[in-house]
Amino acid sequence: MSLYYFDHAASAPRRDEVTEAMAPWMHGVVGNPSGSHRAARAARRAVEEARDVVAAFVGAKPGGVIFTGGGTESCTLAVAGAAQAHRRHHERTTLVVSSIEHHAVLDAAHMMARDHASVEVREIGVDTDGVLDLAALYDALDDTVALVSVMCANNETGVLQPLSAVAAAAQARGPGHVMTHSDAVAAAPWLDLVDSTAGIDAVSLCAHKMGGPVNSGALVLRRDVAIDALMPGGGQERGRRGGTVDVAACVGLAAALTCVEAERRRGHEQVRARQARLRAGLSALPGARVTVEAAATLPGTVHVTFADVASDELLFLLDQEGVCASAAASCSSGAAVSSHVLAAMGVAASRARGSLRLSMGHETSDDDVTAVMNAVERALARLAAETGPSR
Amino acid sequence: MSGGVDSSVAAALLLEQGHDVVGATLKLWGGASDSGCCSVADVDDARRVAQTLGIDHHVFNYTEEFENLVVTPFVEGHARATSPNPCIECNRHIKFDLLFDRAERLGFDAVATGHHAQVLRRGEEPVLARGADPAKDQSYVLGYLRAAQLERLLLPIGAMTKDEVRAHAQRVGLRTWDKPDSQDVCFIEASRGRVAFLGSRMALTSADLVDVATGDVVGHTDAAELMTVGQRRGIAPDREGHKRFVARVDLRARRVEVGRLEDVMVTSLRLDADSVTFARSSLEDATEVWAQWSAHGQPRRARLRHGAAWTLELDEPARPVAAGQTVVFYRAGDDTIVEGAALVSS
C-alpha cells in the first residue's frame, strides 16, 4: 500500500543529507567531545561546526547555542530554568505564556507553579483565528513577570504569532527585566528565524521536525539571560546542560537546518499552492470548515474541522488507505485528546472533536494531495452512510 | 483490549480462527489509576500484545462519554444513597453501545472482548451464558445485553478456565500471561479507595448507626454514602454476638439503620421499571428465574412479577439489597443462561 504522509508536523521524513552527515559519527571511534585527545578534538570540532550553523540559522552568537536532547527539553530549559533562576532572587515569579503553547511550555510552567508557591502562571488568550491577544499580553506584564513565552507558529493550526510585538512589549518593561522565549519548533522548517524571532531572547528548535534525528535540539540565546541548568552534572554546554554532547545528533541538526534553509531560499510557492488546493478541496466537503480564516500560517499546514464526525474514526479510515494524518495532540496512551488550542480559539467542543490536521513537506506531490482529498471524501461518505444513534 | 490477559488471549484466538482482527483499547479515564485496567501502562501492554500478534492497534478516546455516562452517575448515585455498578454502566453505554456503533461505522462485522462468558446459539437467537470457569464468570456484568447486540459479539475465551487462558497466553508469548487480574473499579485507586475518590467529588455525610430492634445508637460513620444496604463489614455485632447488617441509609436524617438478619431481611425486591431489560422477548408475569445481584453472588430462586410495578419475589428471605444494584435473571431450567436484568429500586 502506498503511504501518503501528511504528518510532517509530528515528524518530518528523514533526509538523506542528514543520514550522510551523521553516518561517520555513528560507528567506530567517536571521541567524547569533552576530552583532550585527537579523537575527542575531532568530535569537538564537528560539534562546534554544527553550533555555528545553528547560531547563524537563528541569528545569534555560537556561544548562545545550547544543544539539548530535543525540543521539549529546550522549552523546559527555557521556562523552568528561567523560573528557577528568577525565584531565587525574587519574592514573586510570574510566567506569562500564550494559552496555545505546546505542552512542552505549558506543562513546564505549570510544574513550576505547582512546586513553588511564589511562582504563578498567566495564560494569554488568542482570537478566533488563533493569534495572540496583544492587549491581554500588555495587561499581564507587571514587575513580577520573569518570562514571556510565545511560540513562533502554532503546531496544530500553523498560525504565525506577532513576536516582534511580544519582544517590544517585554523591552518596554525595561531592558533585561523580562526574558522572552519562543518555541520555534514548528516554524523552523519554514521561516527565516533571524527575522521571525528578532528581538526574542531565547529560541527553541529541534531536528526531527526538519527531517533530522529525534532527541536533537537546541535552545539558542541571543542575550545572556539567567537560566538555571536542569541537568547540571558534568558542566557541558558551559554549565547550562550536562551530559555528553551527542555529536551525531548535533551534526544531524545542522544538516537538517542547512536543508531547510536551502528550501526556503528556493521558495515555498509550490507548497503554498498545494496548501491552497487542499484547503479549497476540503472546505467543499460536507460539514467542513477550515479552522483558520484569515491569519497567516505556515505553508505546509492545513487544519479543518468536520461536523458530526469523530477524529478517531476519520483517522482510522484514512489510515486504512495509507494516509498518515493527525488531529490535535496524542496523549501518552496514543489516544487523541481534545485540543487546548482549538478550545482557546473558541471552537465548539463538538466541532473540535472532528478536527483533522494535514501537514506537508516539499516532497509532498500534487498526486499526494489529490489522493488525500479523495480519501477524506470517501471516509466522510462512509461515516455519514452508516446509521447509528446520534450523539 | 484492556491490557489484561483475557482480552490478549481473545485476540490471539480470533486470529487462530482466521478472523481479520484489529485491536482497540478504550481510553476511558484520564485520572490516576492503579487498578490494572485502562492506565497508560495497561494501554502499553495491550499495544505490545497487538504487536506480538501482528495486528493493528488503535486507542479510542471516550473519556468525555465515560465521565458523563459512568463516573458522574456513580457519584450522583452515591449522593442518593444508592450503589450503582460502574462496570455495568460502562458495558451498557460505552463498550456495547458507542463502541459497537463505531465498529459498524468503520466497517467491522463484530466486536470481541475477553469477558468470561459465552454467546451460544440455542435455536433462532443467540443467548448469553455463563463462562466455563465459575470463579471468573462475568455474565453478570453483561446482563443487559440484548439479542441484537449478541449477534455481533464474540466472546472467545468464555469456554476456558482462567488457568487455560493464562497457559495459552504463555504459549503464544504474550507478556500479559502472568499479569494479575484487575481489581475493583478502574477509576478508583486501590491505595486511596472509594472514600478518597467520592470525598474529592462531593461532601460526605456523617451519620449515626442505629439498631432497628432497640433504637439505640450503636456506632458512627463519617461517610454514610459509602455504606451499602446489606453490608455487614464495619458494623459491630450486637451484645449477644449476632451479626448486624445495614438495612437502610437515610442521608437526610443522618441515620443508618442496622439490625440482625431476622429483623432486616427481605422477601422481595422492587425493580426500577425503566431499567427492566430482556435479552429476547419479555418474560411473562410470575416467571420463575434464578436471580443474582452481585458479580459473584449466589443466585436465588425467585419469581419475576409485573403487576402495577416490577418486583422480584424471593423464594427464601435474603439480606437486603441496595438500590441501584443490578439483578440479573438466569433461566430457571438452566441457570447458566441470561434472560435479562434490572435495577433494584429503593
Image (tube, coloured by chain):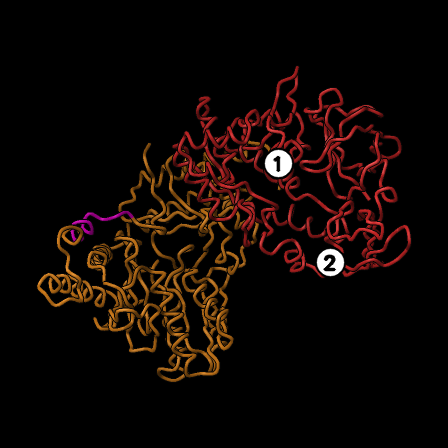
Chain colours: A orange, B red
Q: What secondary structure predominates along the stretch shown in magenta? A: helix
Q: Secondary structure at mark 1?
A: helix
Q: Which residue is mark 2?
A: B223
Instruction: Say if mark 1 contacts mark 2, CB within 8 Å.
Output: no
Q: Earlier in the sequence, mark 1 or mark 2?
A: 1
Q: Quick one: label 1, few (<14), some, or many (20+) residues within 10 Å?
A: some
Compute the Cα span from label 1 to label 2. Answer: 34 Å
Left or right relative to A126: residue B344: right
x 62%, y 38%: residue: B91
Label 2 resides on the chain identified as B
Q: In the rendered image, which quarter contains the C terminus of chain A?
A: top right
The circle on residue A247 is none
Q: Which residue is mark 1?
A: B97
How many tags in the picture? 2
The amino acid marked with disc number 2 is Ala
Label 1 resides on the chain identified as B
Q: Residue B132 in the image: x percent, y percent?
A: 60, 26
Q: Which residues are magenta?
A: A13-22
Left or right relative to A304: residue B100: right
Left or right relative to A3: residue B265: right
Whether residue A290 can be seen here:
yes
Up-down relation of residue A104 to residue B172 (above or below):
below
x 76%, y 56%: residue: B224
- Magenta region includes residue A17: yes
x 31%, y 41%: residue: A366
Res B171 quadrant in image = top left
Q: Residue B116 in the image: x percent, y percent?
A: 58, 31
Whether residue A266 can be seen here:
no
